[in-house]
Amino acid sequence: MRTSCQLKVLFRTLVGGPHICCRTQAMKAAGKQLPKIYVTRRIPPDGIKILRQSGSCEIEQWDSDDPVPRSELLKKVAGIQGLYCLLTEKIDKELLDAAGPSLKVVSTMSVGYDHLSLDEIKKRGIRVGFTPDVLTEAVAELTVALLLATSRRLIEAVDEARSGGWGTWKPLWMCGSGLTGSTVGVLGLGRIGEAIMNRLKPFGIKKILYNDIAPRHELAAKISAEYVSLLELANQSDVLLVCCALTPDTHGICNKQLFSNMKSNAVFINTSRGAVVNQEDLYQALVAKQIAAAGLDVTVPEPLPTDHPLFKLKNCVILPHIASATVETRNAMAALAANNLLAGLKGDPMPKEVPLS
């Protein structure tokens, strides 16, 4: 006869690293083996709560705000059925080999999935969940904030006020660029691009242009955006917003050629992925004043070394990849990733699955 303690969820701290392990004993009492999952980070509470309360998996977690060391990750994935990861984990052939044939589901708490080797994953019949849509509003808000901080030179102005550079009123001191009457270009028009434009329209912008792998007629019609070539996007935009996914085609697409064709008063903003920008070319464009300013929420690498040349430029605002950093959004991402994982383990449709066919 099973005792009541055998039916309780067991939590224990594993020796040798900050892990949490919880086992739901009810299914074991019924003679069923729970699928094992590994969570690669301390995640927002809504996500871990869903996993624990499901009672349908054995959870092991790297209980730290810092990434799990690669060597530790390779050991811990052995024999698991599900992997809950972040964009900081490289899910490649080496890791998939370490996990073995038992791995059925990878759920990433991110919109982008360039950290996943999709070809290797597809070959093994592994399903992949991701977290689009739930961070659209937060990213759009941050993009507008970064644009205003960059175009109106807010960070530079704060530094001047703090350091004693604030003297008598001068007609042209700390003047930036306004948005009223401007042409805004979007590289990669999707839900985030649409959400950004809906927030910028009240500023009185004059025209919206976009470039993508193909025209997005239905979406563009909603915001009255015009499809143009990449060259025309660079030539005409007073503000150029990068919202595209990182793919082989977009890797380094924002380069010397793009910057040399932009207006000298143009502002460049990237809240997508750092690798879509050739940072050396961007640095040279800013130094040579080919463009007026740049605002980046993403870089290569992350974190960007504090001695990087871009940090030395007054006309470059760099944030530490915080576009989705609201409590509500991160909890929603964590919950969606958890639900994707649980659905995948059951063989059910995921709320948000990466199509691999």
Image (cartoon, helix red, strand yellow):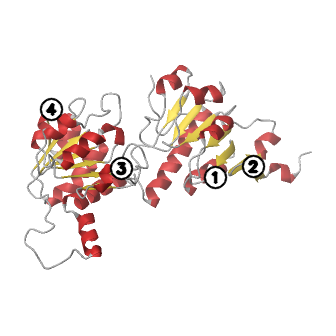
Residue at 59%, 52% in the rendered image:
42
- Disc 1: which residue: 63
Q: Position of residue 310 (x, y in %)?
A: 30, 51
Q: Quadrant of residue 343?
A: top right
- Disc 2: which residue: 14
Q: Is residue 209 above or below residue 96?
A: below
Residue at 56%, 51% in the rendered image:
66
Task: Report whether residue 167 is seen.
Answer: yes
Q: Most extreme residue toward the top, as rendered?
A: 123
Q: Are marks 4 and 1 in contact (CB under 8 Å)?
A: no
- Disc 4: which residue: 229
Residue at 66%, 27% in the rendered image:
102
Give the amino acid at mark 1. Asp
User: In the rendered view of the protein, which quadrant contains the C terminus?
Assistant: top left
Q: Looking at the image, which is closer to me, 121 or 137?
A: 121
Residue at 19%, 58% in the rendered image:
151
